[in-house]
């Protein structure tokens, strides 16, 4: 007689440190769409500000619960002082000058550059929410966007499997140079999370 006990498969535990509530809720919505392979168990942590990111990353890494940890954050505007500081601290933590290149997912000038790709082919030039509010309204209908809780709920409620795929294709075409305005490497992790081949985790860890 066949066993009725369901088979339990170990899933690869992945953590993403999110700069703040906007990034956290955005990735939480993507996770709920079931667009990523079930081989991965993706956990999210909000850093509650970019100044807290390095400490959150180090704590998660030393906790030993995850196979790999990523960061999702803004570059903000030039001269990218806070973003560069995050990169420096991650590199110092791992003892290599290239660690940050493998684990930081960025949006230049901000992660809204990525989020808006669900709704249109948008290239932001500023990170200031007030200055971007007219663009956000044009593509989403949300007036006076200030990233308030109710506004975030409306923004992410509109995300679907279909426009997720569109976002990935649009971000794929963006520059991957984090010093170039309107750039992002976000699609690279999306492609990896969609893949059934998890060897990329080992490949990145070998570089850290």
Image: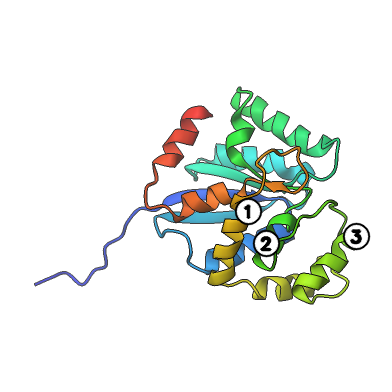
Residue 167 vs 104, above or below: the answer is: below
Tell me how many marks there are.
3
From the image, tell me which residue sits under label 1.
Answer: 171
Residue at 76%, 40% (x, y): give it: 180
From the image, tell me which residue sits under label 2.
Answer: 117
From the image, tell me which residue sits under label 3.
Answer: 131
Q: Residue furthest left?
A: 1
Q: Is residue 146 left or right of residue 88?
A: right
Residue at 48%, 64% (x, y): give it: 35
Is 203 or 118 nearer to us in this picture?
118
Residue at 44%, 34% (x, y): give it: 203
Q: Please rate how many residues cluster around mark 2, counting C-alpha atoms within 10 Å: few if below 14, some from 14 to 19, many from 20.
A: many
3D distance between C-alphas at marks 3 and 1: 22 Å
Of the 4 image quadrants, the one containing the C terminus is top right
Q: Secondary structure at mark 3?
A: helix
Q: Secondary structure at mark 2?
A: helix
Residue 59 vs 152, above or below: the answer is: above
Query: Quick one: label 2 or label 1, which is nearer the N terminus?
Result: 2
3D distance between C-alphas at marks 2 and 3: 18 Å
In the rendered structure, are the residues bearing label 3 and label 1 in contact, judged by CB atoms less than 8 Å apart? no
Could you tell me if residue 146 is visible in this image? no
Residue 148 picture location, percent across and down:
82, 69
Residue 172 picture location, percent across and down:
59, 51
């Amino acid at each position: 007689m066949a066993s009725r006990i369901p088979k339990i498969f170990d899933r690869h535990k992945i953590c993403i440190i999110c700069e703040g509530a906007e990034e956290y809720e955005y990735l939480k919505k993507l996770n709920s769409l079931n667009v990523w392979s079930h081989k991965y168990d993706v956990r999210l942590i909000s850093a509650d500000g970019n100044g807290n990111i390095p400490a959150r990353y180090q704590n998660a890494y030393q906790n030993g619960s995850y196979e790999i940890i990523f960061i999702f954050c803004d570059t903000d505007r030039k001269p990218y002082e806070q973003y560069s500081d995050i990169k420096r601290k991650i590199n110092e933590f791992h003892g290599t000058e290239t660690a940050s290149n493998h684990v930081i997912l960025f949006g230049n000038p901000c992660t809204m550059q990525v989020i808006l790709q669900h709704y249109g082919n948008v290239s932001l030039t500023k990170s200031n929410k007030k200055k971007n509010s007219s663009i956000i309204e044009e593509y989403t209908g949300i007036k006076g966007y200030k990233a308030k809780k109710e506004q975030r709920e409306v923004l992410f409620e509109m995300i679907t499997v279909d426009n997720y795929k569109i976002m990935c294709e649009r971000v794929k075409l963006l520059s991957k140079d984090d010093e170039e305005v309107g750039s992002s490497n976000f699609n690279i992790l999306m492609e990896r999370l969609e893949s059934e081949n998890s060897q990329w985790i080992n490949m990145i860890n070998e570089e850290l």
